[in-house]
Amino acid sequence: MANKQIPYKIYLDENEMPKAWYNLRADMKNKPAPLLNPDTLQPMTAEELSGVFCAELARQEVDEDTAYFDIPQEILDFYKMYRPAPLVRAYCLEEKLQTPAKIYYKFEGNNTSGSHKLNSAIAQAYYAKKQGLRGVTTETGAGQWGTALSMACAYLGLDCKVYMVKCSYEQKPFRREVMRTYGASVTPSPSMETQVGRKILAEHPGTTGSLGCAISEAVETAVNTEGYRYVLGSVLNQVMLHQSVIGLEAKAAMDKYGVKPDVIIGCAGGGSNLGGLIAPFMGEKLRGEADYRFIAVEPASCPSLTRGVYAYDYCDTGMVCPLAKMYTLGSGFIPSASHAGGLRYHGMSPILSKLYDDGLMEAVSVKQTEVFEAAERFARVEGILPAPESSHAIKVAMDEALRCKETGEEKTILFGLTGTGYFDMMSYEKFHDGKMSDYIPTDEELAAAVAKLPTI
Amino acid sequence: MANKQIPYKIYLDENEMPKAWYNLRADMKNKPAPLLNPDTLQPMTAEELSGVFCAELARQEVDEDTAYFDIPQEILDFYKMYRPAPLVRAYCLEEKLQTPAKIYYKFEGNNTSGSHKLNSAIAQAYYAKKQGLRGVTTETGAGQWGTALSMACAYLGLDCKVYMVKCSYEQKPFRREVMRTYGASVTPSPSMETQVGRKILAEHPGTTGSLGCAISEAVETAVNTEGYRYVLGSVLNQVMLHQSVIGLEAKAAMDKYGVKPDVIIGCAGGGSNLGGLIAPFMGEKLRGEADYRFIAVEPASCPSLTRGVYAYDYCDTGMVCPLAKMYTLGSGFIPSASHAGGLRYHGMSPILSKLYDDGLMEAVSVKQTEVFEAAERFARVEGILPAPESSHAIKVAMDEALRCKETGEEKTILFGLTGTGYFDMMSYEKFHDGKMSDYIPTDEELAAAVAKLPTI
């Protein structure tokens, strides 16, 4: 395997890092539908959004025309602590699979948050700080996003208040301690601190919480606390914008070696990683400069693209946030308790939803036991222990590579390895012990959740 | 902080990676004392050692003359999965401390094992495989070394049998699951599988095990199983040899930018990281080509260099392994249960012990609460969540930098950041909750353990 022209890991130089984020919407002829005000059902303006989000982030949220946003120097400096992230040529995996395909992955797990979430966390924290705010609030489930945000806030000296779904708070104390190490205040949700929390606790005294409830508590606290705003780690247009740094770096690294991917694969929950990874490639496709296949991979237990509907829906269970037009399973949909890891959001980024609806992107769903099989196989040959989320992309990339083995095609495959699984060992344990199930929602269950969609 | 000439992270190109390990003993005029056969008290030959270790590793263990050992291509290929490791310029920490010192750290945690241990694990597994062996055995405490070895064995298709101290096996199930993901068999020690295990269980039915007992079980199994050998992650000369890749890379990266460290700092338990980091720099010092200060940092709760004696002692509690002349607290010494993380070995690498005894290296001990304070401070500005072990070096590097602030000296400080603390969050939790104590052994305790040293 020695002396290959393309190294195992391509690291850009720091001066080759992207200096601007790319706003894919600027190249979309068919724009994604706007967010709607839940009271008026009219498109939200930046001004309306700025009660919840920082002013600059609200502006980024609604801007469909500006193709590039300069990355502020302070954010670039922070990025340099863990970026450029490597683009890895998976020589060992290729050899193991005996495939003629060439496999690359963009690895975003080489930072303490363990995932790509940090790319947007630092941006959102920066604009909050710049606006003179005291702090931000957010929710977290398993804790990846909360960790990233606490790191960014520690760096900038900003308060960080995280509502962590109570069952995760109790069952995943390690993520909680990482957040505390970075100075964040972590509250199990539902809590007695908010009106919505007290209401839920009164109605369901023994509840272990849900992401929907944690969102509502975080938003309520942000809106009612002087000098605070709410921040979110996925779904939003602003998040896709910040995450474009993944795709821009991946493309720059491939261009440097004259490599062009045939197919680009990413896992998709709310869409933050996939949207970022594909952005510059999709831009070329939209402008007619190149063609690529794009594949979104989602869990069979939470299949918003492959089995959801394209409609306006609430972004949160509490129905206090704006409405978004997206592929959705209904805001009341909750994945089976047997589902491991993230990718459990009921909807999908409005940008990605539009691209998918326009036939510019494919989507597949995979079962979690086959995801963990792929994860373990990958770990043993490539070294990295992948997050369950990322392993959805690994599974489909391996399937593509094995298809190439059958057909003899020398396709170039690029996938996003969003993070590491160090805090997911309980799920790996279930898998090792044969206790992992593959529950897939029935048509009736999905129909019941979709039936409750708002009629707009 | 923008546009600094020296980047935040210096990554060598893959073709700049060291092609040979450096054997510091070749440049030592005063050689470390040889290992002694516990039965004859005569120096162990490579042949004698090859009953326990692979033949090539036994040869490396006793070779005092060969300065460079070529790294086999297969190991170089494996190294490329996670090396070159970055040399980081700690701009953010410097700014936070407001110090004129220039701080660099060699970060070895960017791999799934989470530490530098992988550098020697792959080498030891490779020679075992090359010799046609079926598998290797080892012991592990917290699990860092066991994880590294299981990764290396998975890659090479070698069986890996790990005896994990029972209390760690039960209290740290996540490390165990990482090893299982890599296909290792993990047995809580003491076990009923070995003679020594059964004996200990009969005498102490409720025992939760110790590293010394796990070593004995691993050695017994290796010696009694066809096609198996025993491997060890620290202390040994062969391990220092493999770990020299840390220092060689660090020096190459510094040379590339014309930077020369004034002081080099590393944490020290058995010495694997420190020995590797300082090797090429110490070589220059020994040859009279350059001068550097070297500082070994050890826990005040297990102070083998600063409070131990330089004498022949057993390497294991069971007294079945060879004797080594080293700084030791006595093979019966067990650090207080309140001690968090690794660096809990009773002795110190014979090479480092000799250098220290000859006055070529300094040593200091630090208390664990101040170590965790430094760790948290570091994490918040540099992003990386450090392992408790590595944080010993962070603490002393920060002290040095703060001294420079007082004196105005622009010293260049290099320290080893050996790994990440993702699996140490229980210790961080104790620290956050104010439940961490700073137990330091009394003179009487130390004298009692030293009194039991063999008389040689």
Image: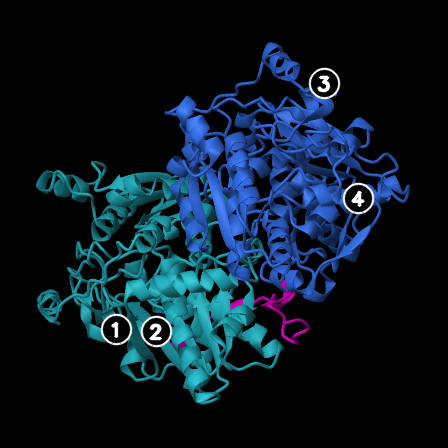
Chain colours: A cyan, B blue
Who is closer to the viewer here, A136 or A201?
A201
In magenta, the rendered stretch is: A1-25
The residue lying toward the viewer, choosing from A26 and B386, is B386
- Left or right, A280 with respect to A356, comes to right
Residue B44: in magenta span: no
Q: State the separation of the CA atoms marked 1 and 3.
A: 74 Å
User: What's the residue type where badge 1 is placed?
Assistant: Leu
Q: Which residue is mark 2?
A: A296
Regarding mark 2 in the picture, which secondary structure is present there?
strand
Q: Quadrant of residue B395?
A: top right
Q: Earlier in the sequence, mark 1 or mark 2?
A: 2
Answer whether labels 4 and 3 touch (C-beta < 8 Å).
no
Disc 4 + disc 2, Cβ < 8 Å: no
- The image shows residue B203, relative to residue A318, as above or below, that is above
Q: Chain of mark 3?
A: B
Residue under numbered circle 3: B455
**Observer-nearest residue: B28 or A170?**
B28
Label 3 neighbour load within 10 Å: few <14, some 14-19, many 20+: few
Chain of the residue where label 2 is placed in the rendered structure: A
Residue positioned 57% across, 47% down in the render: B115
